[in-house]
Every structure is written in structure tokens, then in C-alpha cells.
Amino acid sequence: MIRAEDFPAGFVWGASTASYQIEGAHDVDGRGPSIWDAFSAEPGRVKNGDTGNIACDHYHRYREDVALMRTANFSAYRFSVSWSRVLPEGRGAANAAGLDFYDRLTDELLAQGIEPWLCLYHWDLPLALHEAGLGWTSREIVPLFADYAGLLAQLLGDRVARWATFNEPNMFTMLGHGAGVHAPGLRGRETWLDAVHHVNLAHGAAVRRLRAELPAGSLIGSVPNLQPAVPATDSGADREAAARMDAVMNRATADPVFLGKYDPLTREWMGDRIRPGDEEAIYAPLDWLGLNHYSPQYASAHPNSWGFRMADPPEGAETTLMGWHVKPEAFRDVLIETSERYRLPVYVTENGMADDGEPDAAGEVNDAGRIHYLERYLGAVLDARAGGADVRGYLVWSMLDNFEWAMGYGPRFGIVHVDYQTLRRTPKASYHWLAALAGGSAVSGP
Ligand code: IFM
């Protein structure tokens, strides 16, 4: 049984979301398109042809959603800003109506006693930048991202105290610029490495701009997704494959940002992309680290340009709807390692599981599987703390069922069910379970 009193006073409870996954209102109030609007409009890119056009319509229903956060006893909410809603061209003239949305959302959160945690980038690059050749494969994006950060700091710096630059830079560079299965659909090793280095540089430039614009005491961090790379077998070749996977999937975007140095393997792959002074430009001391984690990943040797490929979890392993291995011990280990390696306060900014549960005849969503998952993963947080990890909060992914990128609306990650026809919100059993925990009552499992 997980008990509220096992967590220290001040432990932060909350939820995370992302702009394109929940906002909808894709063509409202002057928002410009993002690469995800274009990608999801291309036949065959997203399951069932789903798009984020309406999503959860959070843009119009944010007050109802914030009220649900309050009754969940959450003290923090991490959201991301849609860059093309506030800068429809990605640069140049700002869109006052788009800025106003984040202004209202921030005020509503504060009015309900919830800290706004703002993430600058959760994957929805303005399409205009991509079309102008100024996406992540271009080094010219670096000052544009810093300007975007500065704009938001000027607008919200008086009320938003906690900022993150990127959500899962490792994932969107790989999925969108290497594997080609996410927007903007680029495939290849060179575009992947280009994107990684430019995202790292953009992080450093944005942190400096935020520091210059924000009041003293503002807390700036970044949000990697760290998944232990595990060899599929005990062979030397698979162990080597896992080391390579770890370098490109975990270290390439985290080490330069949190330590100021690329690891040797990534440095070799980057070659002359790394110009003199780049590592110094990437590194800017941070105040916190947001850790997203779902499962370990498995690697086996393969004669491609990386020397590895993704392998399935071990035979018989418990997996979620996404095929991800449920292994809380891996979460404990990664929390301890992250805390030790990067020496920053760690907040879990995403963790959770997908199911496809619908309301029953009584209108209730009894997601016992999710509660069981959360119970074990929160147990891992406690184990990590006991093992010395400085973990200070847990924000579940996700507040609402939402647009799960290339998988569309199939997998449901929310603690609140969303009926995509009526947009009605139904708090699930896991919502009530987490609310009891966040509110300080002891809760037992399902
Ligand atoms: O939905 C995503 C989120 O956008 C980034 N982290 C993983 C989640 C589940 O796949």
C-alpha cells in the first residue's frame, strides 16, 4: 500500500500535458499551423487519419480542466506552449490572441492554487519554420528559439516560476528526424544528429535568454526521457548494442545539457558538427531536471549505421497497450542514476500507462490496471528516495486522454477519460486514487 505520509512534506503532486495533444482550436484566434498539423493531414501518417484539430478542446475548456486539477489536490500542472499559436510564423510578429490564452490559463491555475510549470517545446514546431528550411536540422533555428523563449518570459515571467526548455529532446529528434514516424517525417542518421546538436544549442541559448528576462529565483530546467538501454541477450554484441543505444537515446541530449560534455561515442558520431565553443554554449547551469520514464528499452546488435536495433521485451514480460515493459525496478534505478549523475533536484514529469478503458454502464471508468501500475511506480519513487535519489515530485502522464501522436486517439493515457465525440470529461478511478494520495489520505490498491 502506498501512503501519503511516506512522501515528504512539500512533495509535489500534479499532471502533465502537451499543447498539440490536448488544445485543439487549430485554426482559432490566429494560430499558425505546426508540423503536426501538416503531418497528421498526410494520409497514412497517423492511425485512423486522426488529427489534433479538436483534440480535447482544452483551448476552450481549460477552466473545467483546471477545476479537475484542483479537485485532484494537485499543486502543479506542466503544460507546453504551442509556438505557432503565439508566433504563427515561428518568428516575427506575435499573435496577441494566442499569448492571451496562456495568460488566462496561467491566471486560472494560480487562482486555483496550482503552480504553472511551462514547457517551451513539446514537439509542435511552427510549420512556417520547417518550410523555410529553419527546422531542427538547421543551426539557424537556435536564435529563433531563444527569441521565442524571451517572448514568453516577458509575458509570463511575473507569474510562472518554473520553466522547462524541451520535452524529451531525445524522443522527438529520433522519431521525427531519424525514424521518420513523427513530424516532420525525416529519416536518416545525419538529419537525426543535426537535430540533436541544434536542439542542444537551442536549449543553451534559451536558458541564457530566460535567465536574462526572468526574475531572480525563477527555476529553469529541461525534461529528458531516460530509459535504461538493456541488452536483449547477454552476448557481447548485444551489450555493445545497448551501450550504443544508451549513447544516442539517453546521453546525446542529456549529457551536454546537464554536464556540459558529449559522451565519447556521441562526440565521434557528431564529428565536425561540434564547433569550438559549442559545448560551452549548450551548457548553462540549471535548477531542476524533469524526468520522463515509462519502461526500459531493449537493444540487439544489427549491422545498420548505428550498430543496434530496438528489440522486444523478454518473453512473458508484462507489457502495456503500447508494448512497453512494466518494470518499476528500472524506474527506481534510473531515478537513482539520474540524481547521482546530474546532481539536480529531480521531478518525475511524465509516467503512466495507456489503456483503452471506456465508461461502464454506471458511467464509471474503472482503470484498475492503471492504479496497479501507479502504485508500483510510486513505490519505485519511494525506493529511489530511500536509495538516495533527490526526487521531489510526481506529475502523472496524463491529465486527460489525448492525441497520442502517430497512434491517434487509440491509447488512452489520461486519469480523466475524454469522450472525443462529446468532449465530456469523466474522472477515472485512478484520478480518485491519485487525488486521495495528493490530498494526504492513505490509499490502498485496487
Ligand atoms: O504522449 C507522449 C508524450 O507526448 C511524450 N512522452 C510519452 C507520452 C506517451 O507516449
Image (cartoon, rainbow, N blue to C red):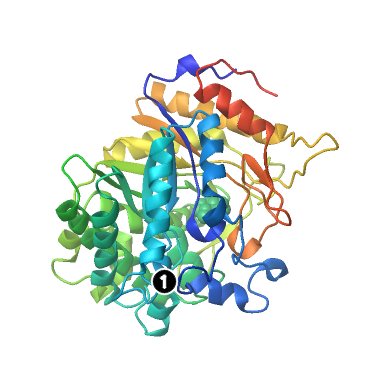
What is the quadrant of residue 38 in the picture? bottom right
| 156 relative position to 354: left or right | left
Label 1 secondary element: helix
Q: Nearer the viewer, residue 355 or 240?
A: 355
| 238 relative position to 389: left or right | right
- Amino acid at the residue labelled 1: Trp
| 411 relative position to 64: left or right | right
Instruction: Residue at 61%, 59% (x, y): give it.
Output: 55
| Residue 137, image x, y percentages | 36, 76
Instruction: Residue at 24%, 46% (x, y): give it.
Output: 158
| Residue 35, image x, y percentages | 49, 73
Report the quarter where the C terminus lies: top right
In the rendered image, the residue lying farthest to the bottom is: 132
Query: Where is 356 relative to 377, above or below?
Result: below
Q: Nearer the viewer, residue 339 or 240?
A: 339
For the residue carrying disc 1, how many other residues have a C-alpha within 10 Å: few (<14), some (14-19), or many (20+)? many
| Residue 65, image x, y percentages | 55, 43
